[in-house]
């Protein structure tokens, strides 16, 4: 017999039996979904920390620092004794942004740490110096900025010296640079000659560089700012016309700088070198002593002009000597030769020009060779222009058709009123007729 899942067919009631009552209708309902009971995770069993780790757990939760002494190291980091327990700090966490120093430099030193993590029920405690270094640098940088505003000097130790200056450790993980131009007003030389590694110095903070609106640890320092400025007092001792003695300290393309006093340099322009001398002459080498005259001293502009040529005590143009008249023969020395003429010094402060058009040279000859600087030469004064301070010269033996003075006198005679002469002649004739 085969079983089916079909519902049983309705059968007629037997004789004498009451018909069955109709079955009550069954209401359809949505299937009931039995919800699973939420699973509650049981709390992990509490691991009892080692007694030595309890202070570190409290420091970790409160983010408080701890002190520790470095007692040794291995390849991965350093062994630290703190709160009577031995802890560990990885080498990469001993510094902030810098490569760690040689391990031996940390041993037996005490530092401030923060707890990074506690492992193995407190049997392994890991520390880091980075948060402490950040806080220390921030405090140190705030102090540096305050001293910059008040111009209060800072002190530090020179850690290295280069061609462009010296680096100084200011403490708190901060370092500054003293540029070579900021080392001293009163001493000159290479940075290595002025400063030594390990030397303690004082300086003024001139700049704390900013990047993207944030302060950084790039600090510029000046040691010479703490020295007296020689331009305010010493420079007053140098006046125009006086003699000077100094040491050549450096060359430039336009002249020599001479140290007159510590921190006080004057300039000898190339045009003020002795006649016939060049800057490359051995007597003008750096370190050599030279003597000359002060041409101009302007302390307010921090400028002193010097000359190695004799400077006249008085202006020769104000009282031009009687020997300097048009047509007079004079003697002078060749200063220099240019393409348009030869400049000849008659006396200090009085130079004339012999035009190249008036110079007779042998065929193929050169004026620079025929008239070297310093050569004595006789010339004739052809013209004098006091207003523009110019002397026109001509070779000796030149036939001057007429001097400028002659022309001026002629012009003066021509300016007399012609009408008056005619009237005077007519009046005189009238008198004769009487």
Image (cartoon, grey):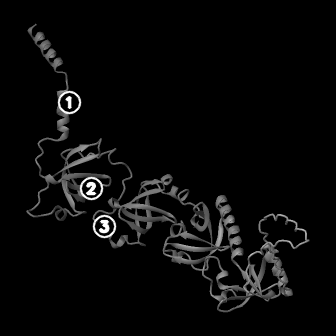
Asked whether 332 or 239 is in front, the reply is 239
**Residue 239 coordinates in the image, percent (x, y):** 46, 54
Which residue is label 1 attached to? 412
**Could you classify mark 1 by the number of other residues whose Cα lies within 10 Å: few (under 14), some (14-19), or many (20 or more)?**
few
Q: Taking 86 as reference, is 115 above or below it? A: above
Q: Quick one: SS at disc 3?
A: loop
> Counting residues from the N terminus, which is met first, the one under dot 2 or under dot 1?
2
Q: Quick one: SS at disc 2?
A: strand
Tell me which residue sits at (50%, 54%) in the image.
299
> Counting residues from the N terminus, which is met first, the one under dot 3 or under dot 1?
3
Q: Is residue 31 left or right of residue 249?
A: right
> Counting residues from the N terminus, which is met first, the one under dot 3 or under dot 2?
3
Tell me which residue sits at (74%, 76%) in the image.
6
Marks 2/1: CA–CA distance: 32 Å
Which residue is label 3 attached to? 278
Marks 3/2: CA–CA distance: 18 Å
Mark 3 against mark 2, which lies toward the viewer?
3
**Residue 364 coordinates in the image, percent (x, y):** 10, 64
Q: Which mark is residue 345?
A: 2
**Residue 87 coordinates in the image, percent (x, y):** 76, 87
The reply to whether residue 294 is visible in this rendering is yes
- Assign the N terminus to one quadrant of the image: bottom right
The reply to whether residue 222 is visible in this rendering is no
């Amino acid at each position: 017999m085969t079983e089916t899942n079909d519902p049983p067919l309705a059968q007629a009631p037997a004789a004498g039996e009451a018909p069955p009552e109709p079955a009550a209708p069954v209401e359809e309902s949505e299937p009931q979904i039995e919800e699973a009971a939420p699973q509650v995770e049981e709390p992990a069993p509490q691991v009892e920390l080692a007694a030595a780790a309890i202070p570190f757990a409290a420091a970790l939760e409160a983010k408080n620092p701890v002190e520790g002494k470095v007692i040794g190291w291995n390849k991965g980091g350093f062994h630290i004794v703190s709160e009577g327990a031995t802890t560990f700090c990885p080498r990469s966490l001993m510094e902030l942004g810098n490569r760690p120093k040689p391990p031996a430099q940390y041993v037996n030193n005490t530092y401030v740490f923060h707890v990074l993590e506690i492992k193995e029920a407190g049997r392994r405690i890991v520390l880091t110096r980075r948060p402490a270094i950040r806080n220390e640098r921030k405090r140190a940088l705030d102090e540096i900025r305050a001293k910059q505003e008040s111009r209060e000097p800072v002190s530090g130790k020179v850690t290295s010296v280069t061609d462009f200056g010296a680096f100084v450790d200011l403490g708190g993980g901060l370092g500054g640079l003293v540029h070579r131009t900021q080392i001293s007003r009163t001493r000159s030389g290479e940075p290595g000659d002025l400063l030594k590694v390990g030397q303690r110095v004082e300086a003024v903070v001139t700049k704390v560089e900013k990047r993207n609106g944030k302060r950084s640890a790039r600090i510029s320092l000046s040691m010479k700012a703490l020295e007296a400025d020689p331009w305010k007092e010493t420079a007053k001792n140098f006046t125009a016309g006086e003699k000077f003695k100094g040491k050549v300290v450096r060359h430039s393309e336009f002249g020599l700088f001479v140290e007159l006093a510590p921190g006080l340099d004057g300039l000898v322009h190339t045009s003020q070198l002795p006649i016939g001398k060049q800057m490359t002459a051995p007597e003008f080498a750096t370190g050599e002593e030279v003597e000359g005259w002060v041409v101009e001293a302007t302390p307010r502009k921090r400028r002193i002009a010097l000359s190695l040529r004799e400077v006249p005590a008085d202006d020769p143009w104000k009282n031009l000597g009687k020997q300097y008249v048009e047509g007079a023969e004079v003697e002078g020395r060749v200063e220099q030769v240019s393409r348009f003429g030869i400049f000849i010094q008659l006396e200090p402060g009085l130079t004339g020009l012999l035009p190249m058009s008036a110079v007779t040279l042998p065929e193929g000859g050169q004026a620079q060779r025929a008239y070297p600087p310093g050569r004595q030469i006789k010339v004739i004064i052809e013209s004098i222009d006091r207003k523009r301070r110019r002397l026109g010269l001509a070779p000796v033996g030149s036939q001057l058709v007429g001097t400028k003075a002659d022309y001026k006198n002629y012009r003066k005679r021509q300016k007399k009123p012609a009408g008056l002469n005619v009237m005077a002649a007519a009046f005189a004739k009238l008198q004769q007729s009487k």
